[in-house]
Image (tube, coloured by chain):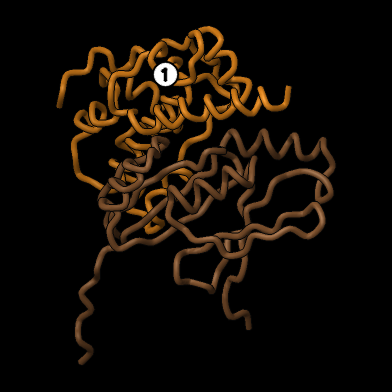
Amino acid sequence: MINRLNVTTIWVLDKDQARDFYVNKLGLEVGQDFKQGTYRWLTVRVPGDAGTEISLEQPGPPVQDEATAVQLRQLISKGAMGGLVFVTDDVRGLYETLRKRGVTDFTQEPTDNFYGTDMGVRDPFGNAIRILQPKKVAHAAKA
Amino acid sequence: MSREVEELNRRLLRSRDAMDRSYAQPLDVCAVAAVAHLSEAHFIRSFRAVFGETPHRYLQRRRVERSMFLLRETDRSITDICFDVGFGSRGTFSRTFREIVGETPSDYRTEHGPMMAPHCFQRAGTRPVAAAGVALRSSSFGDAAAATPP
């Protein structure tokens, strides 16, 4: 049986810029950031949640050949490489905070749905990030 | 060269996001091209090369997808829905809907009920594909220009 998701990957075009966005703008914390030879292992995570780390990977050698990296970078920049969904307890407050920090690439302002309120934003490279404040469900007492 | 392509892609994605966000407003191609910092002709050509369809068609599919959602999830009248999603006339809406979905809005409503997937996945996953063989129309965004507030 698998117990939890340990690491997931987001493709970025520049690790320094990615670290700045995910930590200083979005408000995540650095998990690990160290170099082994020329390779830089950089992860971020939800503050206080050491369970799941998001690895910020940059296409290119030695993992991919340069031609593959070119294709990947083009897919990232046209928003075709997937993204992340986070949960918050105050999506409208977070929206204001992100705006104050200079984030402008919102794909959706906070919007109410039957499952809660969510918003969408893109990272500087084109990856989609959604942030959800789930609706509080009043659980009926079990008889 | 690669960096230039990535930078252009990113700007085109920003203009596509603007259409996704503001589909209910009257949009003209100039305004959307300006989001990408491109001339109208260059914008239409580049958008089509990167995303596989004209910006006009993309916006139509966005509006039709939103109308499909409202047909499934609400009991608003078809005329109200037509204006809600940015179409300027019932005629354009019905024709575009039939062309893209393959059935009329009222037939679609009869056959489909609410879905359970979160809305962001519904938006992505239920957007109708462009019908094969349908000629791509001119890229005028005029649909909503004559819209009166519902």
- Please provide percent x and percent y for residue A74: 67, 33
Q: Residue at x 58, y 20 (%)?
A: B48
Looking at the image, residue B43 lies above or below residue B127 = above
Looking at the image, residue A66 lies above or below residue A46 = above
Q: Residue at x 50, y 42 (%)?
A: A123
- Please provide percent x and percent y for residue A57: 67, 51
Residue found at the far bottom of this picture: A143
- Please provide percent x and percent y for residue B103: 41, 33
Camera-side residue: B97 or A77?
A: A77
Q: Chain B's shade in the image?
A: orange
Q: Quadrant of residue A73?
A: top right
Q: Chain A's shade in the image?
A: brown
Residue found at the far left of this picture: B150
Which residue is disc 1 drawn over? B32
Left or right of B12 in this view: A73? right
User: Where the N terminus of chain A falls, by quadrant?
Assistant: bottom right
Q: Residue at x 45, y 19 (%)?
A: B56
Camera-side residue: B10 or B63?
A: B10
Q: Residue at x 17, y 18 (%)?
A: B148
Looking at the image, residue B36 lies above or below residue B64 = above
Q: Is residue B109 visible?
A: no
Camera-side residue: A16 or B106?
A: A16
Q: Is residue A71 visible?
A: yes
Camera-side residue: A135 or A123?
A: A123
Looking at the image, residue A141 lies above or below residue B82 = below
Task: Tell which subunit mark 1 falls on.
Answer: B
Left or right of B8 in this view: A102? left
Amino acid type, residue under disc 1 in the picture: Val
User: Where the C terminus of chain A falls, by quadrant?
Assistant: bottom left
Q: Quadrant of residue B5?
A: top right
